[in-house]
Structures are given as structure tokens and as C-alpha cells.
Amino acid sequence: MDAGQADTTDDHPPASLLAAIAPKDMYFYSFLKPWLGDGLLLSAGDKWSHHRRLLTPAFHFEILKSYIKIFNKSADIMHAKWKRLASEGSAHLDMFEHISLMTLDSLQKCVFSFDSNCQENPSEYIAAILELSALVTKRHHQIFMRMDFLYYLTPDGRRFRRACDLVHDFTDAVIQERRRTLFSQDSHDLLKAKAKTKTLDFIDVLLLAKDEDGKELSDEDIRAEADTFMFRGHDTTASGLAWVLYNLARHPEHQERCRQEVRELLRDREPKEIEWDDLAQLPFLTMCIKESLRLHPPVAAISRCCTQDVVLPDGRVIPKGNMCVISIFGIHHNPSVWQDPEVYDPFRFNPENPQKRSPLAFIPFSAGPRNCIGQTFAMTEMKVVLALTLLRFRVLPAGEEPRRKPELILRAEGGLWLRVEPLSAGPQ
Ligand code: HEM
């Protein structure tokens, strides 16, 4: 499936070598380590390449297909809430608040097959993840808090520890429980039966993963990977969705065109649910998402550390030992790469009119060997949720222009507020 952009770079030299020549710089990520351990996002070297190989099947479309029902259901729950809140005609909502809960709800079901009903009732586990993300962001702004021994003496540090313990305990409990079930029955028969009915969650896939020598992942590895998916998958996708709704609120003509596309697709269908094969039938909606990821990339920058001299195409050299920050936001807004970069124009991504631009002009999911492993998952969820949202609601600006706020992901200062107006289900 088209993952939005899977434009990877030339993979010579081999991926693992490339990743070793320019490993991630840990400046941005070091505070996440106690929470995410050696999961894919933070690991390096042989461990990373071994795990990346083992985890790639978890994002195969045969597995992702079964999550589409989850995405539909999570969107339904969020929309039911919006309808209640808009009983007076329309509702002012902070998109980040609502959509993050929804993406967390989906992820908890996809990763653990666990329904915490977090969109309706407070969930300790979900609150802990939100708190950890907020604390990591806050710590980045406090120069003296860089030192662990100081940080863990402060109330924030203690809060961080507590939330970390809670999240780890939850993940450990699911893994232990799953192992017990597997040992009490014939594990492989059970997993195979699940695989056949396509109801494998990420934990199952991680438990099944084996390398060429038959070596499995340890419980600690599985926990790190599951926690990494929970962290990396919720905020990014929520940011992508919140900003595309914002862009469509500011461009009602594009919003209406998307809505007509979705209505046409679901015309004779009840219940109105998006299925896997529909994803390729939403070309304009996909263009709108991509253009929004260009203008408002959820991950605004990444960083690498050069372990060798890196020769640039124009002959200049980045000397070994330097840290490089690659501004995804900067590339997406560079007028020598994009004409009128500040204009929201979905037609830039019209597949019928391919533009002559570098595959590296558009890199919301990064590129090369350490690109985003979850990009198809994210594009699928964004398409389902956006399609259902536009089918059910008109989205309008809520007054003041938001100010972009780049944190771990691209947010808006004070939240991203929009107005939503329920639409009747029938044709308008
Ligand atoms: C719109 C949504 C998303 C965006 C824009 C996004 C973007 C990115 C970017 C830019 C990177 C590279 C980070 C770096 O080099 O430091 C990355 C890595 C990663 N992403 Fe995503 N991501 C999204 C959704 C997801 C989802 C849904 C998942 C999992 C369920 C996920 C899991 C990961 C993981 C595990 C890595 C590390 C990969 C590695 O180093 O091998 N992402 N993502």
C-alpha cells in the first residue's frame, strides 16, 4: 500500500552500515531512556539492526489490516463524545486533547488487545503516558535538570519515576499473562490460530519473532518495543490529524471536496465504516494529509552524529564527530525546494501530475534505514479517522490563529482549538 511516502533513499551501503556511520544523536532522546529502554527508537548498532529485522513483520499489511476495525471504533467513540459536546449546535475543542486520547485508545488495543475505555473514563495507564511525555518535554527546558541525580530529587523527577513504574508494570503484566496463556496451551498452535484469524496484536507478533538462529526476544526487549510503539505512535499521529483538521478548517473548499469523496465511497454502505480496500479510493483525502504533513510535520527535526567524515554532493565535508540536526520543518518550508511553501495546496501531491522534486523534499517519516517503521500504520489511522470525521462533522476555525510549538512533536501553544458542527448522516 502507499504509505504516504515510503521514499527511502538509495540503500548503498547496506542499511545497517549507513545507520552505524550516522547513528542517532542521543541529545534529544536521552530523557526517554528510563521509559523506553532499548526499544527501536533509542537502540543502536547490532541490537538495532537485529530488532529492526525482527519487528518489520509486525507492520506487514496483513497484520495492519486487522487494526482497521479498531481505528473505526476508536473514531466512533470520539465522535459520539463530540456529538454530545456539540448538542448546542457546535463545540470548541482542543484537537490535541481529544485526538491524543483516541490514538492512545487505538494503540492500547493494537499493541496489547486491551480496552481501557480511556476516552470515556480516566485511565491510570493512559494518564501516566501523557504525564511522561509532558515531563520529558518540560525537562528539556530546564538546564539544571539534565543531571539525573538532581532531577530525581525533584517532585517532577519522582513523578517521572512513578509514572515509568506504572507503565512498565502494565506492560510486564500483559507479557506475563500472555506467556502464561501460551504455556498452558500449545503456544504455537494458539498463535497460529490467531494469525489465521488475523487477530495478532503487537505483543503476539513480538512473542512470535525469531531470528535465523531461532533466538527469541526477551521479556525486557518486548517491553521496550511495546512501550516505544505506545509512545512513538500516539503523539505523532495525533499531531498529524490535528493539523490536517486545522488546514481543512482554513480551506473549506478542500474540506468539502474530501467530504464528497468519502460520501461517494460510502454511499450505499451501512454502517459507514472504512475498510482496508477503501484506503486506495481516497486520493484527494490522501493528498490533503500529505500536504498537511509537509506544512506541519509532526516530527520537526531529527539529529544524527557523524562517526565518519560525510561528503556532501557539493564536495563539502561534515567532519567526523559533528552532530547534525536535520530540520524536517526547514526542508518542507524551504522556498528553493517548494514554491510558495507557506501555501496549503494539496495538489502538490497529485499523483496524476507528479512533480519533479527530490524524493528527499518530503520526509515527514524521515528517510533511509532509520525511517519510521510505523508510517503505514499512521497513514492508515489518519485516513480512517479523517474520512469519518469529515463525514460526520464540519470543521471550522475557532478564532485565534494557533502558534506552532515544536516540542517532542509539533504542537500549538495553548492547544489547537477548532469548532466542530455535527452534520446529518444523509446527503447535504
Ligand atoms: C504521523 C505519524 C508519524 C510520524 C510523522 C512519524 C515520524 C517518525 C520519524 C521522523 C522518525 C525518525 C526519528 C529519528 O530519526 O530520530 C520515526 C521513527 C520511528 N517511528 Fe514514527 N512517526 C509516526 C507514527 C509512528 C507510529 C504510529 C509508530 C508505531 C506504532 C511509530 C514508530 C516509530 C519507531 C519505532 C521509530 C524508530 C525507528 C528506528 O529507529 O528504526 N511511528 N517516526
Image (cartoon, helix red, strand yellow):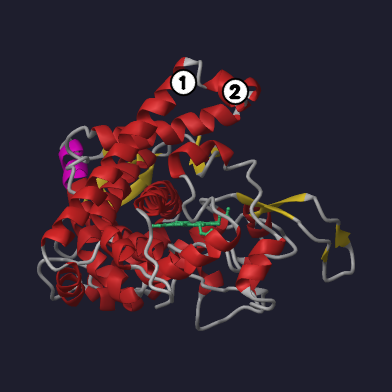
The dominant secondary structure in magenta is: helix
Q: Amino acid at mark 2?
A: Met
Q: Are marks 2 and 1 in contact (CB under 8 Å)?
A: yes
| Numbered range of the magenta stretch | 80-86
Residue 423 seen in render: no
Answer whether residue 276 is magenta in the image: no
Q: Quadrant of the C terminus?
A: bottom left
Q: Amino acid at mark 1?
A: Asp
The x and y percentages for residue 167 are: 33, 38
Q: Residue at x 67, y 74 (%)?
A: 358
Label 2 residue SS: helix
Residue farthest toward the right in the current orientation of the protein: 315
What is the number of the mark on residue 223? none
Q: Residue at x 83, y 55 (%)?
A: 320
Is residue 300 depicted above or below 208 in this figure? Answer: above
Q: Which residue is mark 2?
A: 145
Residue 252 seen in render: yes
Q: Quadrant of the N terminus?
A: bottom left
Q: Which residue is mark 1?
A: 156
| Front residue (pair 263, 282) | 282
